[in-house]
Image (cartoon, grey):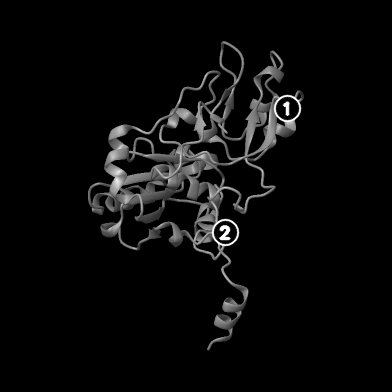
Amino acid sequence: MALWTLIGLAEGNASSGWPRRGAPDGQEGVLGMPRYQPEACRDGCRECADVCPTAAITVPPEGGLRIDYGRCVVCQLCTEACPTGAMRTSFDWAFGVADRADLVWSAAPAPAPQPADAARRRRPFRRSLHIRHVDAGSCNGCESELQALNNPFYNLHRLGIFFTPSPRFADLLLVTGPVTDALLEPLRATYAAMPEPRWVMAVGTCAVSGGIAGGAPGCGTGLEGVLPVDVFLPGCPPNPAAIIAALLMFLGRDRQRVSGGRLGE
């Protein structure tokens, strides 16, 4: 018997029980999206907006701040620049949403139920989902987190979710990167090769909105307007737990946690 087999038998199962309540998710102490506290915001102050590298924070003519988490690269510069604590660090990372508008902060977020028809069509895939990944110009940050999904701790296969090398066997197209000009047609060809029903998930801020490189020469601004997107998951990069949470939300095995740019309990 191989040495590593003996070691594995001796040490037992290394996989986390997460997302069961109380099981570790592997993200303890990892900073997530900055949390906006509007009551602490000072009139006329725009220091956080001035340092934001992706215009995730802007100052509209009517005043206040507009926070678009779909553009946030989690750099924490806003939390460092804010003089009043209106932008604070947090451990909020489960930002997968079905509607892009839910990534924009709103004073009065509305409930975000899954569309009934979409949920019905996805019902046969609740216990088994096959994913084709396409790197559409990523820096490989998101790819490093995707690789972690198959390590012993997260063990994605235990949830009935698998990556497939062929789009002809895929249910979900998972895209990373801002969609460069060179990858635009290969991406569309991959989507066209998938059987119906087929869905698309934008993973990482680049795929959601273009990220740091969005709009540069030869570089797009994400998947919107390129393919119909069913799940948006910002982050630079989103961690493995965030990706799993978004996949389970898509399958109807977990709830969407963000509405109006705010993470619910």
For the residue carrying disc 2, how many other residues have a C-alpha within 10 Å: few (<14), some (14-19), or many (20+)? Answer: some
Secondary structure of the residue carrying tag 2 is: loop
Q: Which mark is residue 82?
A: 1
Q: Residue visible at 54% across and 58% down?
A: 144
- The amino acid beneath tag 1 is Cys
Secondary structure of the residue carrying tag 1 is: loop
Residue furthest to the right: 83
Q: Position of residue 37 (x, y in %)?
A: 66, 24
Q: Quadrant of residue 91?
A: top right
Q: Position of residue 118 (x, y in %)?
A: 30, 37
Q: Is residue 193 left or right of residue 219?
A: left
Q: Nearer the viewer, mark 2 or mark 1?
A: 2
Residue matched to label 2: 16
Q: Residue visible at 43% across and 32% down?
A: 100
Q: Residue visible at 40% across and 45% down?
A: 201
- Compared to residue 65, the image places residue 253 above or below, namely below
